[in-house]
Image (cartoon, rainbow, N blue to C red):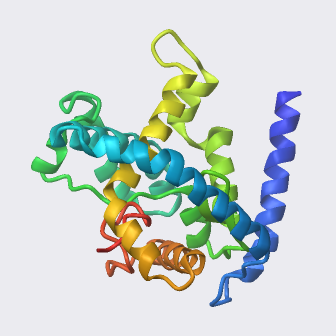
Amino acid sequence: MISRLKIIISVLVIQSLVVFSSYSEEKEVKDCFEKINRATFAFNMALDKVLFRPVASGYRKLPSPVRTGTSNALNNLSNLITIPNNILQGDFKSAGNNSIRFIINTTIGIIGIFDPANALGFEKMEKEDFGQTFGAMGIGEGCYLVLPVIGPSTVRDTIGSLVSLSGGDAWYNITVKNDTQYLKESDYYYSKLTEGVDFRAKNLEAFDSLEKTSVDFYATVRSLYIQDRKRKIKNLKVKTDTLDDSDWDTLDK
């Protein structure tokens, strides 16, 4: 039954990607569900004000080494998605660099809390995901989406996330799918929650400033997200409006 379900999902994903590839030549990403997206965006903003921003503000009060170590560990885990996508995109040099970084930082760096790999000449590289890989294959974004809690996305990026949850993310596989005595399902969700708090803490002032200066904050966030995704897919070194190349949402001050 499970095998049949996986086959059905795979077929649906392939069919969807073929349909969305028709958008690949379009310069503008269509906001097909703008009314729903704006309502979801308003919900996310309200949730941010009552939950994520206060938690992020408290997180900012932690000692800098604690926050740096947390960010390092989360970045180290992201290699489990980045490496296979490096390979799928034919970027074997980056795949090798990131693989060595992961091994060194997971062992010598104590599960990624420290980054000795960088000191050894293996520099941190930009994150990759299945949405970017689909983009590199020439598949268009499809419509712009705003997902509850998660935030900005596109149909293509959402399908990419589903691929991760269907076996493409090793961290998800060894925690959620193979809940053990040492690595449990809760570890995956704790890591994702911490990742959200960590990046939100990095953007407190920048996010507030952008909201105050934007005539239409929803449109501004949409534009930032789409610009950054296109930049990453093309592997451009020039930043759009971001500070951290690994996260679109680390906004420029």
Coordinates of residue 106 in the picture (x, y in percent): 28, 32
In this orientation, does residue 105 appear? yes
Quarter of the image where the N terminus is located: top right
Tell me the quadrant of the picture where the C terminus can be found: bottom left
Residue at image location 68% in from the left, 76% down from the top: 140
Decide which of 52, 4 is in the foreground and name it: 52
Residue 78 visible to the viewer: no
**Rendered location of residue 211, percent (x, y):** 46, 73
Q: Is 228 situated left or right of 93 in this image?
A: right
In the drawing, does residue 99 fall left or right of residue 229?
A: left
* Front-lying residue, 17 or 241: 241
On the image, the x and y values in percent for residue 98 come to: 32, 49
Q: Looking at the rendering, which quadrant does residue 91 occupy? A: bottom left
Q: Where, by quadrant of the figure, is residue 243 drawn?
A: bottom left
Name the residue rendered at 23%, 28% in the picture. Answer: 110
- When the figure is inspected, residue 16 is found, relative to residue 68, above or below; the finding is below
